[in-house]
Amino acid sequence: MEPGPPGCSRPAEPGPRLRRLCGADQEASVALLSRARAEAELQRCVPAVAAVLPAGGSGERMGVPTPKQFCPILDRPLISYTLQALERVCWIKDIVVAVTRENMETMKGIIQRYQHQRISLVEAGVTRHRSIFSGLKALAQDQPDSQLSKPEVVIIHDAVRPFVEEDVLLKVVTAAKEHGCSDYDLEFGTECLHLALKYCHIKAKLVEGSPDLWKVTYKRDLYAAESIIKERISQQICMVMDTKEDEELVGHRLEEMLKNEFSHVKVTSGALGHTGRDLQQIILEQCYNFVCVNVGAYEFEETQKLLDVLKESDLSILYPVVVISVHFLDCKSVPFGQKMENLMQIREFAKEVKKRNILLCGLLIYYPQDEQKLQDSLRQGATIIATLIKERNSGLVGQLLVA
Amino acid sequence: MEPGPPGCSRPAEPGPRLRRLCGADQEASVALLSRARAEAELQRCVPAVAAVLPAGGSGERMGVPTPKQFCPILDRPLISYTLQALERVCWIKDIVVAVTRENMETMKGIIQRYQHQRISLVEAGVTRHRSIFSGLKALAQDQPDSQLSKPEVVIIHDAVRPFVEEDVLLKVVTAAKEHGCSDYDLEFGTECLHLALKYCHIKAKLVEGSPDLWKVTYKRDLYAAESIIKERISQQICMVMDTKEDEELVGHRLEEMLKNEFSHVKVTSGALGHTGRDLQQIILEQCYNFVCVNVGAYEFEETQKLLDVLKESDLSILYPVVVISVHFLDCKSVPFGQKMENLMQIREFAKEVKKRNILLCGLLIYYPQDEQKLQDSLRQGATIIATLIKERNSGLVGQLLVA
């Protein structure tokens, strides 16, 4: 069977606001400006680069019916993570993905749903090499239908290596310019180098990758990938609370406890951002975890404001966003049973925002007079928050936990 | 630095009841007898076999300070899983572990805590090969202090390959008898084969392993190992409930829902076992997940009985056991707030059994008159049960969830 004609298609580019940053997660706003400058400099130095992703494999070794590039990680197909990693590199002008005819519609759906940009699709060949060939043909200037520009360097990247970093890609491009190689392979690179030399008389150079650049091959690799992704997006949290509150008070004390569980704890006073960091800015910096402290008369006032802002943003397109609505129980004013009944509204809120990939849970923290007991409650609260954020499991959405 | 004298030590063997089975998880009781016969036959045919585990490595590539063989998976060190896998093979008479002097006490602690048997410790050398040599010396008959018997075949097995199966080991032993090789290496075996031929003039044979036999090398491998272990012990659950209850009633309906989430759902009427399977038998078959349905006047009657039996058993030595105490809310008889207050006792029970590695959570299921709503409640209940069992996270212990 010969590969079909490339039939290069470029889907619409809705372009969510987030993507304009073209940057890594977890960048502080101060760094954004200097990063923008560095990017402009890179754009000037780096040659015209495109990437070709052969993604026509069937994933036999995985032991699951779905080809591995389409296997879900946190409910999103693996290939979308790889595309995201390449998209973030602003000097890669075009990304050509080769998929089989039967997976063409699936792939178009993925590009649309996760708002991937600069992607073109071509039909995969029967082998990995033929798929690469189809991709390269689409990038050649003599294709009448093609809207792609001819690149100086083409990066060939496996669709099932989701953790590729910009610095490795830059090394590859630099080596390609110096050594004239147009293909790279890292972990299993030596075989490719021999082939290049033997059949193509092309000098090839092995570029050192990182252990993170491994290939998802077996089912265990999917597990590993999911854990790595969960770990990466669970490093920082944003606390939304009244930042003008006395430092002795409970929100700030919870903040101190949370610093033992997370490497970055940002604090904002909410949507209006009178003091502290602006919530919009924190969303732009791609923080996927929110702890919202409600101490007002209406139980869910702060949480509802936060949810409204999150629903307006594009934050939850790529990853499920965790929101934990924190409440305090002072037994003297409201009895436990009554408080629980009041808070059960959270089930309805959670159901609604779940559709937007926002995972909402409630947390009721005991607020006893006894100082030691209060410490214990807050510590348990922080443990529960850490568990919910790190596991990121939709099965517990709408639950009200008690610390 | 030369390796120290082997100084072979054999810790006490408390021998929990479970281990006497010397069998795989999830064996039905009917199969136990025929398995016992097969084992007796194997004992007769297989030569005297011992295993040597070099475990002196520092785990540099892992990027964590703890050597990888001691890294925790579900709070238990990796090497304990490897020992468990070898121990289960009843025809391996002795297991010799080579550890560095500084890790000797840690290793003794692991053997005692997880009740490993047939294990002897020797001091590791500066290289893997010297550690193997120390292990082999301990097995030689001319050691005055040694209580070990000289084996015909010695299996050399990496301490960081926890998923080795009996059939692969049997293939290795058979090949060793036929080909005269006394060492094996699977994934990265070719190098070893060359070494054996070059330096020892020993014929070596490469035995085909399985993908599961991979080596824990990077941090991602620890994540993968944890997910695999969680998956393996979350396949089956045991429901404890009044099995004489009408089939139309709620326990049986929950059972039907749970069959969508788990491959094996066993049902018992509890400690006394009037009908259905005996709880003791289910514990012997190593089921690590229990769903206890409480419908009596005293909220926790069934759950407390179950916890008493579990505390008496050795079941939670190797894995955390999950117990979910299920209750139903019929709003006509008790209001929600009142019911929640009654059920908050679960926090105290959970705190107590947590010390025994039992993770207890509560689940309150709405029991509305409306048939469709009841279906929804039961379905959500099954999802929550599946989440708690599959995640097996101690951070949510003592929580009361609502479906």
Image (tube, coloured by chain):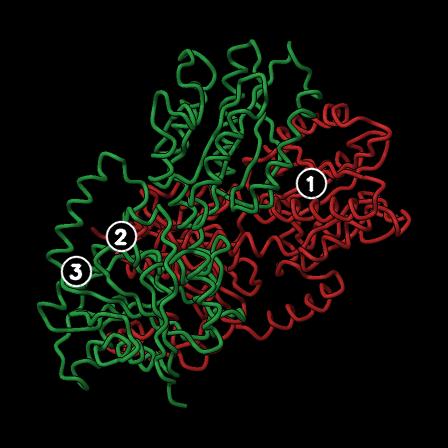
Chain colours: A green, B red
Q: Residues within 10 Å of mark 1 (few under 14, many from 20)?
A: many
Q: Quadrant of residue B221?
A: bottom left
Tell me the number on the disc at residue A171. 3
* Residue found 59% across the figure and 32% down from its top: B355
Res B172 visible = no
Q: Position of residue B159 (x, y in %)?
A: 41, 56
Residue on which the image places disc 1: B324
Chain of residue at mark 3: A
Please identify, in this view, whether the residue under mark 2 or under mark 1 is nearer the observer. 1
In three-dimensional space, the C-alpha distance between marks 2 and 3, rounded to whole angstroms, equals 44 Å
Q: Residue furthest front?
A: A144
From the viewer's side, name the closer residue of B267 and B148: B267
Residue type (three-letter) at the residue carrying disc 3:
Lys
Name, please, the residue furthest toward the left: A178
Q: Position of residue B31 (x, y in %)?
A: 72, 66
Q: Chain of mark 1?
A: B
Give coordinates of residue A26: x percent, y percent.
31, 40
User: Which image quadrant: the C terminus of chain A?
Assistant: top right
Residue at 48% x, 50% y is: B80
- Which residue, given by chain and number where applicable, does mark 2 sit on? B3
